[in-house]
Amino acid sequence: MRQPWVTDRTRVDDVSADSCADYPDRASAMEVRLQAQEDEITLLKSSLADALRRIHVHDQLLPLLKQQLIAVNPGAARVLNQAYSDGCAGSRRLSSSSTSDGIHLPAAARLRRNSEKLSYPEKQRKCLDKKAASSANLLARSPSLENRAKELITSAGSPGSRRGTYSQGQSIKMFIRGRPITMYVPSNIHNYEDLKMELPSERLVLDWVYGYRGRDCRDNLFFLPTGEAVYFIACVIVLYHINKRTQRHYLKHTDCVRCLTLHPDKVRVASGQTAGMDKDGKPLQSCVHIWDSNTLVTLQQIGLGTFQRGVGSLAFSFADSGAFLSVIDDSNEHMLSVWDCTKGTKQAEIKSTNEAVFAVGFSPTDSNIIVTCGKSHVYFWTLSAGQFTKKQGIFGKYKKPKFIQCFVFGLTGDVLTGDSEGNILTWGKSAADVKTLGKGAKETFQIMRQTRAHEGSVFTLCSLQGGALLSGGGKDRKIIRWSADLAPETECEIPERLGTVRTIAVVDEGEFLVGTTRNAILRGTFSDGFVAIVQGHVDEMWGLATHPSQNIFLTCGHDRQVCLWNTEDHSMDWCITLEEYGLCADFCPSGSVVSVGLSTGRWVVLDLLTKEVLSDSTDGNEQLSVMRYSPDGSFLAVGSHDNFIYIYSVTESGRCYSRLGKCNGHSSFITHLDWSKDGKYIMSNSGDYEILYWEIGDGCKLLRNRFESKDREWASYTCVLGFHVMGVWLEGSDGTDINALCRSHSERVVAVADDFCKVHLFQYPCPKLKAPSHKYEGHGSHVTNVRFTHNDSHLLSMGGKDTCILQWRVVRGGAGSSRERLPSASSTSTSSPEPAAS
């Protein structure tokens, strides 16, 4: 669904113990070119298929016109034949009128025989346009046949004019990437032009955020005196009260949040975001927000447009009560800058290094001393009169690790670092070695002590009162408490399924919060162990389904996890891991089972209570894109990337399946489908923007006359192409800008997930282009899916690369701008005013 020019707000450069944070510009450029070529190939295929269908319609229509014309005017047959032959004259002889033995070929066969001569679809259209012009001239000569011809065109399913009004109804055309798509107007709409599109009275309010970003971020979990854990995912910073289990949300960031730090006063918070790209490929401006965690009011907006690509690390000073903020950006040089927090002005700036930088921090006793660490380095900076001087830590006789992951300051002023070799290194000042460095050499920072701590990386270090220390390991998943002189005191291990330790926040002397690399937050103690209070997916998500009668929903994605969530207590009921990754899902109307479509053409049916696999089937060898049960649960339709829709008969409340047939007619992969309310018909969309209709009871028969389906009622509406949702498309859309949509069960509104990180809410139906909508932000990547809960009380939206699930509460009425960031439902999140002037 995503387009080559759409850049995920989620950074691609996952920085872990064995990876580099450099931005893969060249690889990205090649991916863009490859995707553009694939899009062009898809367009050419769809145009060719469309041309074949249109020529086939012409071949069927001409004999009928000829018969009608002869019936009125027997001498008109010669005129008709001449008009037909003139229509293709001068079009590079695209359709030769006869074979060597004089037998006339159908137009479709002639087109196939000569298709190798075509370079662009426009050449096909020229011939078709000339045919149409010739037919129009013929009808002009015989006005009495005009109405009959229009009826024949309508019954044959041929696209009408841009706003043609036929004797049996109307048709409207919309264009995607230059391709016309005909929409037939239902009979109950007598004047399409008089329809008025208005904003829906319903609105969305952010209710809950599922997930945490720990897989590629560090030092991003803090505990506030209010009893709240503060962390981020996508564009939302979450304040989660760990006892009351409520959330507040800071929503002022316009792109993915990348880093977070807490002020010494334990109230103010600084957060930095990535820059990202707009849809035209232009870089967006990044900044740092300083805000009040009690009121959620933005106090300062620092460095707007200064930080290239975004903000990677930041830290408040301590010696002067947090008067300054140090920032490392994500540019190639990883610029280090110091800012006055009150005035919002830059005090100094310098190029740091071309290597990845993981952390920055002020000395607790001197705000002029700053430490940074990252790939194979630790730097000690001194700021004097607005100028930086740098000293590099010298490893000497010790092996230089690949990564210095983290650091803290000891009570004596020494710096302790954790590295990818599993060691804690103690750094201190040392007199210069005059023999080696020569006279005049200044003091250096060298390793005073090496302490073996973990197998694999030391991802985090956390200081405790009295000089004690906590360390979190990668490979061994251990949390170890160390005394002030680095003697191990106690340890515990977190469950493997929850990942490795990424960061630690202290609740009190005995209780801790742990952020993990599998996007979970744990709470616990050394004696009682740790349990997950926040969980989420760890890779791109596409599959989303809501239960037909309960407040639960299911998600699946590229991490091969299938998760069942509860919308009332905001928890994960269960999670299983499959052999392949899931892309789509749907609950059986009985509510006891759910089917999940996988990436290999395989699909499984799971029991909700036991998590047992009740059925395991395979259709084709390409990924499945949609699963949809009929309203009464007697059929299951499986849409595949092999262009087929497989139909199964369902018995025993969704526990038994038998293949009934398959729908064969699409010329590209299936993207969306819906059942009619009577369970007899299917409407489907494909990757080349087709809208087809099928009669299931009659052997999965393709309905050639789409005009006859204009008044059919649909049990659900998730197809992105159709008359009733035509207005959700922006002018100039290329067909993949909308990834998913969902009509509410009340049929009042339709929610849309787009490729630009937005969730839209339109009135339903919205059949006119440029229909107004409420727009909501929060996701940091393309939004892959949206679904309403069974009673329309909530809407679920799912991000792609941001691994974020947002739960929106649906409210009626209310004033305010459709673009405003609305408050949250639980512990009501406050939408902050504009940053205060300095």
Image: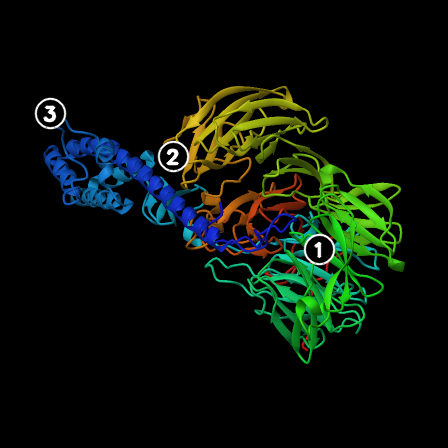
The foreground one among 491 and 558 is: 491
Q: Is residue 318 above or below residue 472?
A: below
Please give the name of the residue rendered at 77% of the width and 68% of the height, measured from the top-left corner.
363
Q: Is residue 81 above or below residue 761?
A: above
Q: Secondary structure at mark 2?
A: loop
Sequence-first disc among 3 and 2: 3
Using a 10 Å C-alpha cutoff, classify the residue at mark 2 as few (fewer than 14 neighbours), some (14 to 19) or many (20 or more): some
Quadrant of res 311: bottom right
The mark lying in front, picked from 1 and 2, is 1
Residue 778 in sight:
yes
Using a 10 Å C-alpha cutoff, classify the residue at mark 1 as few (fewer than 14 neighbours), some (14 to 19) or many (20 or more): few
Checking the image for residue 317, the label placed there is: none
Measured as percent of width and height from the top left, residue 200 is found at 58, 53
The residue that disc 2 covers is 667
The residue that disc 1 covers is 397
Sequence-first disc among 1 and 3: 3
